Amino acid sequence: MSGEAGSAGPTSGASPFSSLRHPAFARFALGQTLCGTAQFLGGLATPFLVNQLTDSNTWVGASSFVALIPAVVGTPLSGTLVDRMDRRLLLLVGLSLQVLVMSVVVGLYAAGELTPWRILLLNFVGGSAASFQWAPIQSMAAVLVPRESLVAAVRMVSITFTVGRSVGPAIAALTLAFHGPGLAFAVSLGFYVVGLGILATVRTTWTPSGAEGSLGDQFREGLAYVRVRPEMRIAFRLAFSVAGLGAVFAFSLAAGVADDLFGRGGGGLGVLSTSLGVGSLLASAFISGRGGRMSRAVLERRSILLYGAGLLVVASSSWLGVGMFGYLLMGGAHMLHGTTLSTSLQLRVDEEFRGRVMSVFLVAILSGIPIGGLAFGILGDLVGLRWVAMGAGLALCLDAVVTGRRGAFDLLDREVELEVDREVEPAAEPEVEPEPEPEPEPEVELEVDREVEPAAEPEPEPEPEPEPEPEPELEVELEVDQAGGPAGGGADAPNGGSTGPFADLPDSGDDRGQAREEDHG
């Protein structure tokens, strides 16, 4: 299952852009792209300002840590709420809080009151707000497009992040280099407001199931659901390791890399982040074409190797051009890695558990980045960030090799096969269950028909109406004679063989004669 065949599923080759033919999803993708741009723009300006104010990798790592830890704690709650309430409403609440936090950041910076400690506090509040938007974003695609477009929609969601990751840093590079963090924060706020306005127009027809029990019980139920699925467990493990060893240098420690490894400030940070985004865009184009037909085992193994190779390239030189190439590789790896794991999970999970499963997935990512950021930030101040980056790159390459030899990557493809089987079974079940029903149904219909026929036949009860009784009596006598039964049998017939409506069935001449004798006798 590790070949490049189309084992990824029958719809895996669909272009991500085909999902945009659904208007509601198209508006969602646009709004999410703008909000993603705002997120990465502000997310780049914040560590730059912290590094500018403190000149410390520890402080830079701490700012990332306090932003993501509340998200780690709040995302499971958000994921559980996603399965119980309106996902759209939850998303809008989270984004509204983000707008509020960014407004305070802009105001404090303009007043010259944005200190490192206040940045930590605002990052904590912003991280808490983000916990209410990440799980809904990951779950919205499933309720905005039909099943056959889900793979394309999931990939499109990944592309929205990619575009935001590309455009946001590019804008940050310009604003930080020429106007400083203040303008970057203001532009980020503008993107947030416009994106929120567009997302507010998105409507869904999905209604949450009437989940019973407390939030804690629901979350534990989600964990139990994940625990018995090895393909989900390996996806979560890979998400955590890549986030803690690779993504931490792509995002939270990027400012330190630009300063310590290449001796550049905001301009260097913007260039590296833009290279990261360009790599993601190239990977998106690859996924839309040939990459969409490759197995997930191959894509995931190669993405981790590529991530490790990118970090080794970054750590190997002090020339910014080499660093740009390394970040280009890391951006492509990040896109391939995230899309592969997210698609595998989205295709497998039952709708009633989608929010909780995706929240656990996000927790794996979100916990890896702050833990790695804090640990590597401290190590970077002690031994140098270059050596730390080189060690992380080697660890990623080793992880890819060992995991591949154990065959764990194959679970990502096997999962899709299970999903296909699962779709076939419910389609066959309705055919198996109705089979016993058609058997009694024809019998009942026949009986009804037969009952109706005699009910219509006795309607010649106008026989007694034409009271020339000689004719009916002769008919009865003739029928009795033809039947060959005793003259007194008519009185015993009801207690004998035929009773009820079947006494009038036209198939039996004896019964009909007896019934008429009863009527006239």
Image (spheres, rainbow, N blue to C red):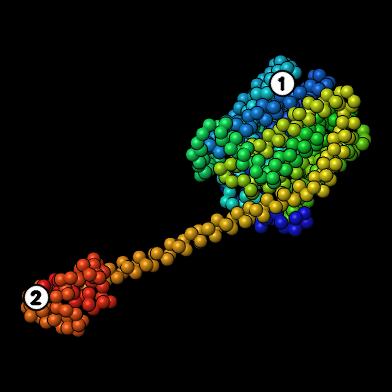
Residues packed near mark 2 inside 10 Å, few (<14), some (14 to 19) or many (20 plus): few
Sequence order check, earlier mark of 2 and 1: 1
Q: Position of residue 256 (x, y in %)?
A: 83, 27
Name which quarter of the figure residue 376 lies in: top right
Q: Secondary structure at mark 1?
A: helix
User: Which three-letter amino acid code belongs to the residue tagged 2?
Assistant: Pro
Nearer to us in this view, 458 or 269: 458
Quick check: 125 above or below 270? Answer: above
Would residue 521 appear left or right of 61 to someone viewing this image? left
**Which residue is under mark 1?**
120
Any mark on residue 516, and which? none
Q: Quadrant of the C terminus?
A: bottom left
Quick check: 349 above or below 445? Answer: above
**Which residue is under mark 2?**
466
Q: CA distance from mark 2 to mark 1?
A: 105 Å
Nearer to us in this view, 310 or 412: 412
Q: Position of residue 98 (x, y in %)?
A: 63, 28
Name which quarter of the figure residue 186 lies in: top right
At horizontal 81% and vertical 31% (from top left) the residue drawn is: 254
Q: Quadrant of the N terminus?
A: bottom right
Q: Secondary structure at mark 2?
A: loop
Residues packed near mark 1 inside 10 Å, few (<14), some (14 to 19) or many (20 plus): many
User: Which three-letter amino acid code belongs to the residue tagged 1?
Assistant: Leu
- Whether residue 172 appears in this view of the structure is no
Would residue 71 appear left or right of 506 to someone viewing this image? right
- Whether residue 519 appears in this view of the structure is yes
Q: Nearer the viewer, mark 2 or mark 1?
A: 2
Q: Position of residue 258 (x, y in %)?
A: 85, 30
Would residue 387 appear left or right of 85 to someone viewing this image? right
Would residue 304 appear left or right of 16 to someone viewing this image? right
Counting the numbered discs, the total is 2
